[in-house]
Image (cartoon, rainbow, N blue to C red):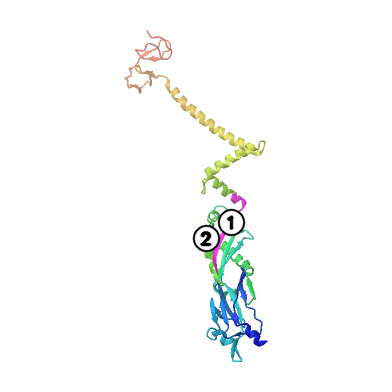
């Protein structure tokens, strides 16, 4: 049986038929040995690691290898034994999957607090997906999976998700990005988070290859304010337009809810508008009546050529330029000063002889 078992491991390979296995330990019992000259196959997106007594010995990249003392320098020195003229090795063999694991989900189970320059301290929720792969298999083995028989995506997703959520909070705090900027620039914000998270992933032998923000949700009050600003077409502090819209909304509410506090508000706004309209009308009427009031002033004279009203002190008509005669005559009926050539009094109409 010992001879048969030693012959079993002349071909070492792993055909991965799963979509979520990150590390696979080749099935060998405690007494199993690897014969010198065995064939090791490492496929693309795989790395093979030999471990002896819990320590990493030799690492193989993709390719086909004939195991000898030349390409097993570490294992040959510490773990080889000779039996019937053959060199054999006692070791464990691990295959690490280095392909990309895509569409991994992340999301905020609890809201993230952020300080926004426009809305103050608010809490946001977000979710999306990311992708990663193993780039340093020995480091990943030392830091994460150890000597587990099998390591799947579900074993590490929770840890990576927490790392990303923590990084999102750090990125928001360090960049001082506003809520509106995040809501309008998902892709740019995702790139910032991915860039900041690379160092944390590299520390455990991983590389984050993609990070996407699918949705960021804000408190209802903040979303309502953003919607109102969008409807007005403003993103800056144009408070005049904003106040006018709020006043118009209050009047509309008052019209829909007669007999309520909204009616009182609506009446007040309506009175203000009526006062503004009355002032406008009165100002217009005053402007219309002003020329009429200026047509007749005590002591004014009339031009003998065009009949225009001329001030008593004027020597020429302001309309036609006719030189005004210095009148010393008076109407016998009303006593008004009249032109000596006048045939009727301009004030009372008495015929002048």
Quarter of the picture holding the C terminus: top left
For the residues marked 2 and 1, what is the alpha-carbon distance in whole angstroms?
19 Å
Q: Is residue 10 magenta?
A: no
Q: Which percent across, then down, holds residue 338?
A: 38, 14
**Which residue corresponds to the image point at 58% horizontal and 56% vertical from the top-left?**
216
**Magenta residues (range):** 207-223
**Which residue corresponds to the image point at 64% horizontal and 68% vertical from the top-left?**
154
Q: Which mark is residue 175?
A: 2
**Which residue corresponds to the image point at 52% horizontal and 61% vertical from the top-left?**
191
Determine which quarter of the picture holds residue 104.
bottom right
The secondary element bearing badge 2 is classed as helix
Q: Is residue 216 magenta?
A: yes
Specify few, some or many for label 1: CA neighbours under 10 Å numbering under 14, 14-19, or 20 or more.
few
**Front-most of residues 159 and 269:** 159
Dot 2 or dot 1, earlier in sequence: 2
The secondary element bearing badge 1 is classed as strand
**Front-most of residues 50 and 268:** 50
Above or below: residue 231 compared with residue 184? above
Q: Is residue 75 visible?
A: yes
Q: Is residue 321 left or right of residue 242?
A: left
Q: Which residue is mark 1?
A: 215
Determine which quarter of the picture holds residue 148.
bottom right
Of circles 2 and 1, which is in front? 1
Q: Which percent across, then down, holds residue 2?
A: 66, 87
Q: Is residue 176 visible?
A: no
Above or below: residue 111 compared with residue 57? above
Above or below: residue 350 compared with residue 270? above
Spot the residue most to the top: 353
How many numbered circles are shown? 2
Q: Which percent across, then down, holds residue 291?
A: 44, 24
**Front-most of residues 311 and 306:** 306
């Amino acid at each position: 049986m010992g001879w048969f078992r030693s012959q079993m491991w002349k071909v070492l390979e792993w055909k991965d038929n799963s979509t979520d296995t990150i590390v696979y330990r080749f099935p060998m019992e405690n007494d199993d040995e690897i014969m010198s000259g065995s064939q090791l196959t490492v496929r693309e997106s795989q790395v093979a690691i030999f471990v002896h007594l819990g320590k990493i010995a030799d690492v193989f990249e993709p390719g086909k290898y004939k195991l000898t003392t030349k390409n097993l320098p570490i294992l040959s020195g510490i773990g080889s034994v000779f039996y019937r003229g053959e060199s054999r090795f006692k070791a464990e063999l691990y295959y690490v999957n280095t392909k990309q694991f895509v569409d991994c989900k992340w999301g905020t189970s609890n809201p993230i607090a952020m300080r926004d320059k426009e809305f103050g301290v608010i809490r946001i929720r977000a979710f999306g997906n990311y992708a990663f792969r193993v780039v340093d298999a020995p480091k990943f083995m030392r830091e994460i999976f150890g000597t587990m028989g099998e390591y799947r995506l579900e074993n590490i997703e929770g840890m990576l998700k927490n790392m990303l959520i923590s990084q999102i909070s750090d990125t928001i705090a360090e960049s001082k990005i506003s809520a509106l900027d995040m809501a309008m620039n998902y892709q740019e914000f995702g790139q910032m988070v991915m860039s900041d998270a690379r160092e944390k992933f590299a520390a455990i032998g991983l590389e984050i290859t993609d990070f996407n923000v699918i949705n960021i949700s804000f408190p209802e009050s903040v979303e309502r304010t953003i919607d109102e600003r969008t409807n007005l077409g403003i993103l800056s502090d144009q408070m005049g337009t904003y106040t006018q819209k709020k006043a118009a909304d209050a009047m509309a509410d008052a019209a829909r809810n007669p007999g309520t506090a909204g009616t009182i508000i609506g009446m007040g706004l309506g009175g203000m508008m009526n006062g503004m309209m009355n002032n406008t009308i009165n100002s217009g009427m005053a402007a219309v009546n002003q020329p009429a009031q200026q047509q007749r002033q005590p002591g004014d004279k009339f031009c003998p050529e065009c009949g225009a009203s001329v001030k008593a002190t004027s020597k020429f008509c302001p309309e036609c330029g006719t030189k005004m005669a210095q009148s010393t005559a008076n109407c016998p009926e009303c006593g008004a000063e009249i032109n000596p050539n006048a045939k009727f009094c301009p004030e009372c109409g008495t015929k002048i002889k």
